[in-house]
């Protein structure tokens, strides 16, 4: 390891990099290299994603018929709980930070690794332990409380494996706390000379804000879940209404984390989108500082809106009005971002590469997801829409249309950097478009269903057979979406074996990770000391944009730059 | 793991490969430790939030229940923890002055205070197990040794649930702190490589002071409730 770091000059032939530096299983499972840990995370979150997707597929299958013939109510409850818990706690929350953030963040700021590499490895092990524990929970019968674990159902009445699932989520929470802690220390102290706060890529800003939310929110939900376990197992009484306790208190504490958790999921995706918009419009992000501060604004205000999940509970009207008002305010920084991305494209030289298609998809879907959030943030309409498919559609537009589009866009963007190989641009674009179309077919009908009054978490609707059309549309769309999600698994894997070498900077992008690190990077990321001398997204400095653009049809541009 | 050229001084602190120099490493460790303490504050904070909510709701009853707690033993424990924090501060100072013998002495003194804390905690807790004040299936209020006490069994269960959760979580932190202190003291004794500068001691110290401060909030909240 050491000889690679000390002054080996840049070589043109396949060099020692983080992927071929050690081939044993132990060299992966005991690695402290943030890039290898990112790859481990990529494999594990992808596996969890597929388990969660299977649960979703079975739900959509059940809903094609109004009579609910396939599963019993109990089985269906377990299906949607499994889907929710896995997708939220085991896929989206760790997804972008632990995979893309882990890989790219240290390189983007010119650091050799995260601040605490062993803690980073520990957080992956915690994730794996949590995931295995949750899978064990499924084997032992699963849980039926939904991902929200509302009391007193979870604390008293449910007789499924709630405690084990709660402990799994608790451990997963610590995994993300340690990742967040690592990112905060890294961003504060590990930036290369010249990498000032306002030269940080917006992806790093987003990861930083996300980490702050993780650090402030996750411990609260963790201890809340412990209280539920104590109440279940030892007959403690905290949330029990029989004792004069307040079950709604659980919802307050749960949403104190879980609303900001929405931003834990979507802020990193927004960071990815900023990178993609700049790179593939060949322009500096419009209003860089506004985007950076809106990220912090969302993180801060996100902690003040949790009550909008509880308009129909016992909270007072005044509380409801205040929470509703702040919920509207949080739309402002989100809108700032959307407008700034749009203006970034304006008069830019937009290139429709695969990552950019995801970014554009994100933009449209996030706007729909965000605006429908305003319907739900208004107390009057919320009374009609809450607990219906409208809300299911709303948060899937934000979570899938936002976070997963961001994740896939980022994965396709940094894939050449991670593995040094280009995937097929044709299949990449096709998959991106199939996912976009499939997504809309899946979730748009659910807005209509919700408006018509179909409640979420029901597995039959024989009393309203007219809903079947929309449900069948949605299930058909889910099939298309499923195919779209499977495609990257094939062509990305294929690219590892047969893909063309990507070269250092296949997108001709600006940024330390593209301009100063190899693809795949060396174990210590750089062969030299990084010094940053440019503002971020300095695309204006690329004089012959059009020349590059003409070449962008699908093949990577071999990089001509001299190593720094 | 350090990849920088070895320095001539064998006692020089280890600089790990991701850092440029010892200053950056030390600053990063301190940032990381404070960030971790923020999560601890949030975790205890959530419990204090629940506590204040229920105390507000059941003010008079909480006074009745708290009379069954031993303010004297707990007060002694408060003094004990404050003393331990003093020893910890001295240990950090000795580490900064590179006096490893004194450092170990003060670390073990802190450790002993932690142990004493747990003994006193046990003296407090064990009778509650005997008089069925632990909120499980055999919970009983009023307690068998003081049948005349008022308050309702339901609300008493909430009070003792919170009491055992919060003091239990704190006790767990004391145990973790003691493990950290003992490990550190042994590493100093055997001159383990990562302990060649004062920062690990400083970090353990920060953690221990947090444990102390958490108790300083717990003590009045549970043992000194005014009528």
Image (spheres, rainbow, N blue to C red):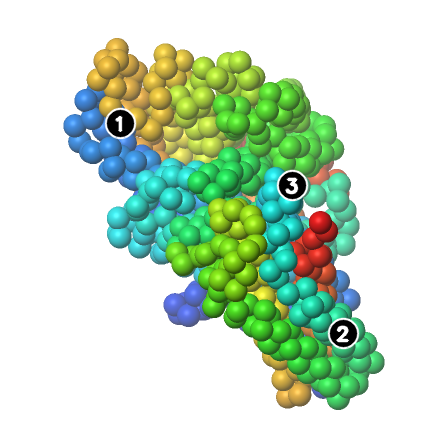
Name the image quarter holding the N terminus of chain A: bottom right
Q: Nearer the viewer, residue A223 or A516?
A: A223
- Mark nearest the camera among 3 and 2 is 3
- Using the image, name the chain to which the residue with label 2 belongs: B
- Using the image, name the chain to which the residue with label 1 belongs: A
Residue B178 percent across, percent down from the top left? 62, 74
Pointers 1 and 2 in contact (C-beta within 8 Å)? no
Q: Is residue A1 left or right of residue A480?
A: right
Q: CA distance from mark 1 to mark 3?
A: 42 Å
Residue highlighted by disc 3: B56
Residue A142 percent across, percent down from the top left? 30, 46
Residue at (33%, 29%) from the top-left corner?
A457
In the image, residue A401 above or below residue B21: above
Which secondary structure, mark 2?
helix
Numbered circle sitting on residue A459? 1
Q: CA distance from mark 1 to mark 2?
A: 62 Å
Q: Is residue A274 left or right of residue B81?
A: left
Residue A374 percent across, percent down from the top left? 56, 19
Q: Are marks 1 and 2 on the same chain?
A: no
Q: Is residue A301 left or right of residue A223?
A: right
- Using the image, name the chain to which the residue with label 3 belongs: B
Residue at (58%, 73%) from the top-left corner?
B123
């Amino acid at each position: 390891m050491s000889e690679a770091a000390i002054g080996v000059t840049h070589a043109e032939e396949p060099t020692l990099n983080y992927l071929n530096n050690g081939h044993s299983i132990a060299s992966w499972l005991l690695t402290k290299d943030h890039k290898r840990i990112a790859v481990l995370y990529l494999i594990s979150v992808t596996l969890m994603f597929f388990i969660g997707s299977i649960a979703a597929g079975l739900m959509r299958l059940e809903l094609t018929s109004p009579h609910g013939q396939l599963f019993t109510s109990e089985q269906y409850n377990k299906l949607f709980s499994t889907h929710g818990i896995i997708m939220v706690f085991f896929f989206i929350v760790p997804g972008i930070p632990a995979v893309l953030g882990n890989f790219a963040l240290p390189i983007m700021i010119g650091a050799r690794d995260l601040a605490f590499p062993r803690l980073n490895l520990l957080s992956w092990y915690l994730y794996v332990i949590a995931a295995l524990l949750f899978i064990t929970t499924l084997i032992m019968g699963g849980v039926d409380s939904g991902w929200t674990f509302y009391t007193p159902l979870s604390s008293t009445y449910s007789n499924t494996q709630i405690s084990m699932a709660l402990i799994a989520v608790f451990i997963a929470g610590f995994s993300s706390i340690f990742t967040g802690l690592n990112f905060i220390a890294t961003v504060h102290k590990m930036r290369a000379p010249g990498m000032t706060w306002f030269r940080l890529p917006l992806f790093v800003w987003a990861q930083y804000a996300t980490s702050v939310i993780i650090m402030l929110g996750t411990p609260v939900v963790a201890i809340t879940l412990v209280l539920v376990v104590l109440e279940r197992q030892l007959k403690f009484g905290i949330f029990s209404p029989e004792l004069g306790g307040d079950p709604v208190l659980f919802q307050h504490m749960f949403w104190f984390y879980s609303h900001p958790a929405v931003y834990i999921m979507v802020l990193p995706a927004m960071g990815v989108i900023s990178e993609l918009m700049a790179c593939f419009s060949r322009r500096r992000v419009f209003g860089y500082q506004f985007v950076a501060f809106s990220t912090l604004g969302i993180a801060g205000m996100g902690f003040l809106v949790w009550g909008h999940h509880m308009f129909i509970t016992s909270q007072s009207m005044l509380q409801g009005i205040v929470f509703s008002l702040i919920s509207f305010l949080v739309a402002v920084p989100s809108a700032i971002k959307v407008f700034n991305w749009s203006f970034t494209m304006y008069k830019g030289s937009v290139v429709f590469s695969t990552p950019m298609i995801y970014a554009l998809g994100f933009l449209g879907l996030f706007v729909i997801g965000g605006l429908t959030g305003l319907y739900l943030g208004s107390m009057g309409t919320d009374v009609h829409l809450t607990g219906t498919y409208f809300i299911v559609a709303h948060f899937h537009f934000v979570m899938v249309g936002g976070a997963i589009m961001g994740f896939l866009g980022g994965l396709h963007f940094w894939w050449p950097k991670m593995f040094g190989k280009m995937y097929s641009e044709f299949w990449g674009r096709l998959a991106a478009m199939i996912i976009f179309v499939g997504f809309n077919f899946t979730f748009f009908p659910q807005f209509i269903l919700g408006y018509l009054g179909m409640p979420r978490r029901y597995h039959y609707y024989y009393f309203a057979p007219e809903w079947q059309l929309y449900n069948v549309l949605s299930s058909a769309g889910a099939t298309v979406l499923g195919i779209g999600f499977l495609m990257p698994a094939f062509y990305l894997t294929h690219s590892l074996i047969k893909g063309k070498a990507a070269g250092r900077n296949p997108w001709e992008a600006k940024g330390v990770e593209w301009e100063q690190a190899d693809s795949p990077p060396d174990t210590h990321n750089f062969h030299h000391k990084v010094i940053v001398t440019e503002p971020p997204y300095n695309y204006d400095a690329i004089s012959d944009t059009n020349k590059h653009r003409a070449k962008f049809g699908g093949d990577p541009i071999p990089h001509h730059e001299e190593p720094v | 793991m350090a990849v920088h050229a070895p320095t001539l001084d064998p006692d020089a602190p280890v600089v790990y490969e991701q850092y440029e120099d010892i200053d950056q490493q030390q600053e990063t460790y301190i940032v990381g430790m404070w960030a971790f303490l923020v999560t601890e504050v949030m975790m205890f904070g959530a419990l204090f939030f629940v506590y204040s909510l229920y105390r507000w709701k059941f003010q008079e009853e909480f006074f009745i229940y708290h009379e069954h707690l031993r303010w004297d033993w707990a007060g002694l424990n408060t003094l004990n923890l404050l003393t331990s924090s003093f020893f910890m501060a001295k240990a950090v100072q000795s580490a900064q002055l590179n006096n490893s013998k004194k450092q170990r002495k003060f670390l073990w003194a802190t450790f002993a205070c932690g142990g004493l804390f747990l003994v006193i905690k046990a003296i407090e807790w064990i009778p509650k197990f005997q008089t069925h004040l632990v909120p499980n299936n055999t919970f009983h209020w009023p307690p068998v040794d003081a049948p005349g006490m008022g308050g309702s069994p339901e609300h008493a269960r909430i009070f003792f649930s919170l009491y055992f959760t919060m003091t239990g979580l704190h006790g767990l932190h004391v145990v973790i702190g003691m493990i950290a202190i003992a490990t550190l003291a042994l590493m100093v004794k055997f001159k383990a490589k990562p302990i060649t500068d004062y920062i690990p001691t400083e970090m353990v110290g920060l953690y221990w002071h947090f444990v102390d401060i958490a108790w300083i909030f717990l003590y009045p909240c549970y043992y000194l409730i005014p009528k």
